[in-house]
Image (cartoon, grey):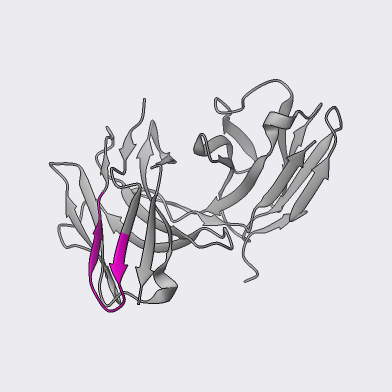
Amino acid sequence: AQTVTQSQPEMSVQEAETVTLSCTYDTSESDYYLFWYKQPPSRQMILVIRQEAYKQQNATENRFSVNFQKAAKSFSLKISDSQLGDAAMYFCASPTGTASKLTFGTGTRLQVTL
Amino acid sequence: DAGVIQSPRHEVTEMGQEVTLRCKPISGHDYLFWYRQTMMRGLELLIYFNNNVPIDDSGMPEDRFSAKMPNASFSTLKIQPSEPRDSAVYFCASSLVLAGGTDTQYFGPGTRLTVL
């Protein structure tokens, strides 16, 4: 069963604007980490941001931030001041089964336009 | 640190041939993961190791697939015999373990496998 859902197959944002990518997950773990990865055309999987579930404060990394709602099991990624280099596939990942294993969503393809 | 190293980067082979993919994890990492990425199925976990021991191989699609980790700095994923439907990008990733779960998984550049 799919435990990580990214409901937006594609998104588009203008340069310098803000975009939010959504993700919902399902895990039975109590302490865990959630991740957003970026995969540009080079296909390299690059960590964007990580959220520790036991922390109420949303993680922030420069122009990237998350809106983490533990009760709703929602973990969205906000990209501010979008740049052309942000164009990529973005994958959300959460633990499944055990905290050691991650399940990845199907990805959201982000286009950045001038 | 050099990051996770995978070889080869590209592999083209004919159906029925044996294929061996190689991975060197980041030094000191406890976990090693093998993933397969296809358009149809996305990113799938095949198998993972903890301290060189296979923990969960439930994602390995068939007996044609096998993986080993003879030491902390090397792992292989072997497909024998290979079939066209095995064509995909295979990623290796490694991570540490933390009290709250595994730390960030760091991915290698992937091996693009094409089976003709």
Residue A109 x, y percent position in the rendering? 40, 55
Residue for point 16% across, 46% down: A70
First to last magenta residue range: A12-22
Instruction: Look at the image and tell me in which quarter the C terminus of chain B lies.
Output: top right
Can I make out residue A4 in this image? yes
Q: Is residue A46 left or right of residue A67?
A: right
Whether the magenta-drawn stretch holds residue B76 is answered as no
Q: Report the number of discs.
A: 0
Compared with B77, A53 (above or below) is below
- Tell me which corner region of the image, top left, top right, bottom left or bottom right, holds residue B64: top right
Q: Residue at x 35, y 47 (%)?
A: A9
Quadrant housing the N terminus of chain B: bottom right
Q: Position of residue B80 (x, y in %)?
A: 80, 28
Q: Would residue B71 be visible to someone looking at this image?
A: no
Relative to B97, A6 lies left or right: left
Identify the residue at horizontal 56%, vertical 52% (top origin): B94
Residue that appears at 36% across and 25% down: A1
Is B66 positioned to the left or the right of A111 in the image?
right
Residue A67 location (% of width, % of height): 18, 58
The one nearer the camera, B50 or B66, is: B66
Q: Residue furthest top?
A: B63
Q: Is residue A23 above or below residue A14?
A: above
Q: Quadrant of residue A76?
A: bottom left
Q: Nearer the viewer, residue A97 or A21?
A: A21
